[in-house]
Image (cartoon, helix red, strand yellow):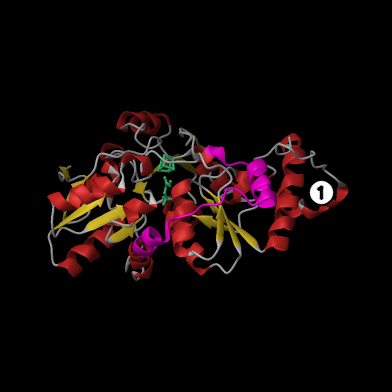
Amino acid sequence: MAADGFAPLAFTPQVEAETQALWERVKKHVTPMEWRLQAPLIAEINRIKREKNAVILAHNYMTPEIFHGVGDYVGDSLGLAKEAARSDAAIIIQAGVHFMAETSKILSPDKRVLIPDLRAGCSLASSITGEDVRLIKARYPGIPVVTYVNTTADVKAETDVCCTSANAVQVVEHVAKEWGVDRVILIPDEFLARNVARQTDVKIIAWQGRCEVHERFEAQDILDLKAAYPGAQVLAHPECPAEVLEVSDFAGSTAAMNDYVLSKKPRQVILITECSMADNVAVDAVDTEFLRPCNLCPHMKRISLENIYEALIKEQYEVFVDPEIADRARLAVQRMIDLPPPAVPARYDLVKARHHVDVELI
Ligand code: 13P
Ligand code: SF4
């Protein structure tokens, strides 16, 4: 069905021809009936993008028709933030959640940043406010604050350096060295903080925020899957509890999981993360079988081809960040972007992680 208020778009021979190459890539994962509805929207979105000098930044948790069909830049939170900083498009459409759109606006204040559904939030971003961070700083004077990008702009404005799951260990170690301290505040994801604490000698002070998608996985789920599929490789996101990572074969950001599957080509793989991740990697990982014990992110799933189309036509919903807050938040995000790439590719050393390290919870 077409977006509200728009006539349905037809699957014409021209649309079929324009989308043929994409159909060849995705046809094992999309039914012909779905394609007849999706292809006209994909063709039209791509045409309007060119006309309006717009780009679509699509997170790895977008559904395949968005990720493969209309995403100009696809990747993890770090990759999308870097792209927002270097893009010269007039309009950025964020196919992701609100904190990602705010990050794009912070990095590109002169561009129009649109999110197709303003309700696309995040349980981590809503777990903490700028006022909370001011209170934390008053309680721990002199201890630097590292904040996960999954936060609102006012939280980033109170932050020394931002991080993502792809570089959290590197950022924490860099900040401890630069500030000459042995403790760092790493907020708001408690599980990411616990997983980082197991990779470094820097002591971690953590907040009790959780990702509602990854907190639901349990170590027993993984052990049951390993018993059922002894040859399968288990890849977990570091927003999962530490016990889940302990029984996995690899842990990393969504981009690191993608690289692992495409480079190592495991025969069977289990991605312990959001459901669309496996659907997207499966399009290119033709030799790998994906077992799918996934959880859906209700916020990511608010974004659809229909509301992207509507966002482009009506140029809605524009994301604004108070310029004074944006200026302070930009410093924290830019310090992260300016860090050199780690000497070894960012990954969580699961052997090291088996040694339990406690964190101080605020
Ligand atoms: P990354 O893509 O940075 O791994 O983040 C995962 C996530 O949950 C984003 O909301
Ligand atoms: Fe937030 Fe988790 Fe959804 Fe990512 S997957 S947007 S961290 S709730």
Vertical position of residue 331 compared to residue 61: above or below:
below
Vertical position of residue 272 compared to residue 204: above or below:
above
Q: Is residue 239 left or right of residue 317?
A: left
Residue at screen point 64% across, 48% down? 311
Vertical position of residue 93 compared to residue 240: above or below:
below
Question: Is residue 312 on the magenta stretch?
Answer: yes
Which contiguous range is marked in magenta?
301-330
Q: Is residue 208 or residue 116 the one in the foreground?
A: 116
Where does the N terminus fall, quadrant-wise?
A: top right
Q: What's the amino acid at mark 1?
A: Glu
Q: Is residue 264 or residue 86 the one in the foreground?
A: 86
- Locate residue 273, reporting x and y percent: 43, 40
Assign the magenta stretch its main secondary structure. Answer: helix
Question: Is residue 264 on the magenta stretch?
Answer: no
Q: Circle 1: is it few (<14), some (14-19), or many (20+) Cα within 10 Å?
A: some
Q: Is residue 111 left or right of residue 259?
A: right
Residue at screen point 42% across, 39% down? 231
Residue 161 in view of the camera = yes
- Locate residue 39, reporting x and y percent: 74, 45
Residue 356 in view of the camera = no
Task: Tell whether circle 1 marks a residue whose Cβ is less than 8 angstroms from ligand 1.
Answer: no
Residue at screen point 73% across, 46% down? 41
What SS does tag 1 mark? helix
Instruction: Please tell me in which quadrant of the rendered image residue 54 appears.
Output: bottom right
Where does the C terminus fall, quadrant-wise?
A: top left
Q: Residue furthest right?
A: 13
Q: Which residue is denoted by mark 1 in the rendering?
A: 16
- Locate residue 260, reporting x and y percent: 44, 53
